[in-house]
Image (tube, rainbow, N blue to C red):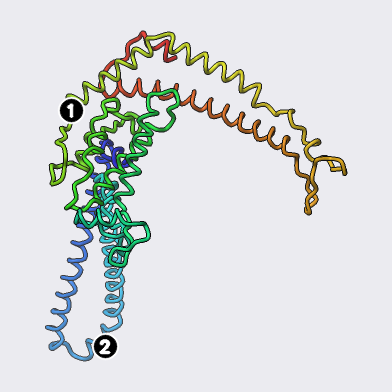
Amino acid sequence: ITIDAIVINNIELHEAWDLYKSIITERAEKIEAKVASVVRSAAEKVAREAAAATSKSSNEKDKDGISDLDHENDEEDQHEEDYECRTNIVRLERMIMQIDFTLLSSRSFLICIEQNFDPRNLFPLPYHDHEDRATVQTTSNHSNNHGKNYVKPIHEHIKIIVTTLYDKYISVIDTPTETTERDDIIGLYGLYCLYRRLVPSNNAPDDKLHKALCTNRNLPLISLFGTIPFLPIDFLSTYAPLEIARGMRMRIRTPSKNEILEDAKVVLDKQKKIFSSKAIISELYDECFAWTFKAENDLAPSERINDSVLFEPTTSSSTYSYTQQNTFITPFHQRSQATELIEYKTDLILQGVRIGRRATLLLRNFLFYHSSLCVSLESRYIPVIE
C-alpha cells in the first residue's frame, strides 16, 4: 500500500520513467532498422551472386575466393552482434513492460490480493445452502457431513481477525497508550480488502464491518509516508466497493470528499486546542522530565542483587542447590526479586517509549493535517512546537 502511494504521488519518477522508456524504444527502433537493412542486403547479395554465378568462370572464382570468404565472415560476425543486441533489447522491453504494468502503475497491492491463495484446493468451499450449514453447526464437533468435518473457509477467519484487531486499534488511538496502532490500522484495511476478494460472489459480505471501516470520522486521514495521506474511504472505494447485494441488511452511504475534508478540519481544530492548551503540553513535558529523572536512577546497574551472592558455593545448611553441571541455582526468593527487578525496568523503558511516541504522534499529526488541508501554520504554535 505504501509503495503504491509513493509511486502514484511521485511526479518526477513518472517523468523520468517515461523518458527512460522513450530512450529504450528509440534504441530498439534503430536496432530493428539496422537488422532489417542487414537482412535486405544479404538477400540482395544472394540474388546477385546467383545471377552472376552463371556468367563467372571457374578461374575468377578461384582468384577472388579468399577475399570473398573474409568479407563474408566479417558480415556474419556483425550480423551476430546485431542479433544479440536485438535479443537483449527485446528482453529489456519485456522487463520494462512488466515493471510498468505492476510497480509503476501502482498495482502492487492489487496483484497481491488477486493471486490464487489456494492452488491445491486445500480450503473447503463454503456452504451455500443455509439449512445445510445450520444443520452442520448444530451437530457435535466430531460429527461428519458427508464424511468430512466442517471447517470455516479462510475468508471467515480473516473477517474475525479484522473485526477483533479493528476494535482493539480504535480503542487505543487518541489515548496516552497509543504507539503504532494508527500505522497498523492501514494494514488492517488491506487485510479487509483481501477478505472481500476471497468472499464468494454469491455470498453477501459483512455490511456492518464495512460500515465501521468507512464511517469512522475520527480517522478521515492517516499519514502514510511523509506528507502522503491515506484516505480510508477512497481506499475502500477502489479495492473493496460495497454494492447492494442479496442478503445485505442495510444500505451504506459512502461519505463524500467534502464530508471527509470537514471531518479532517474538525480533527485539526481538536489538535489546535491541544497545542493551545498550555496545561496539556506542560503535563506532557513534566511527564517526560519525571521519566528521565527516574530512568537515570533506576536504569543504572543495580546492586540489589550481588552476583557473588547469587553464585556463592553451597553448604550443607544452605538453601542453595547444586546441579550436576556444577552450576549454582539461586533460591526462590532471590529469583523472584530478580524477576521483579527486570519487569520493573522493562515497564519503565516501555513507559518512556509511550511518552516519546505520544509526543511524536501529536507533532506529526498536527503538521500532517496542516499540510494535507493546505492550512498555514499560525505563528503562535511555533514556540510550543520548539
Q: How many marks?
A: 2
Report if residue 262 is visible in the image. yes
Query: What is the quadrant of the N terminus in the image?
Result: top left
Disc 2 crowd rating (10 Å Cα; few below 14, some 14-19, many 20+) is: few
Could you say whether the residue bearing mark 1 is in a helix, strand or loop? helix
Report if residue 23 is visible in the image. no
Residue 193 to residue 336: above or below: below
Q: State left or right for residue 51 relative to residue 236.
A: left
Residue linked to disc 1: 257
Identify residue type, mark 1: Lys
Disc 1 crowd rating (10 Å Cα; few below 14, some 14-19, many 20+) is: few
Tell me whether circle 1 and circle 2 mark residues in contact (CB < 8 Å). Answer: no
Q: Nearer the viewer, residue 155 or 332?
A: 332
Residue linked to disc 2: 62
Residue 95 percent location from the top left of the image:
28, 56
Residue 185 percent location from the top left of the image:
35, 36
Residue 258 falls in which quadrant of the image?
Answer: top left
Choose the circle earlier in sequence order: 1 or 2.
2
Q: Residue drawn at (30%, 66%), measured in percent from left and top? A: 84
Q: Nearer the viewer, residue 263 or 155?
A: 155
Marks 1 and 2, how far apart at CA = 86 Å
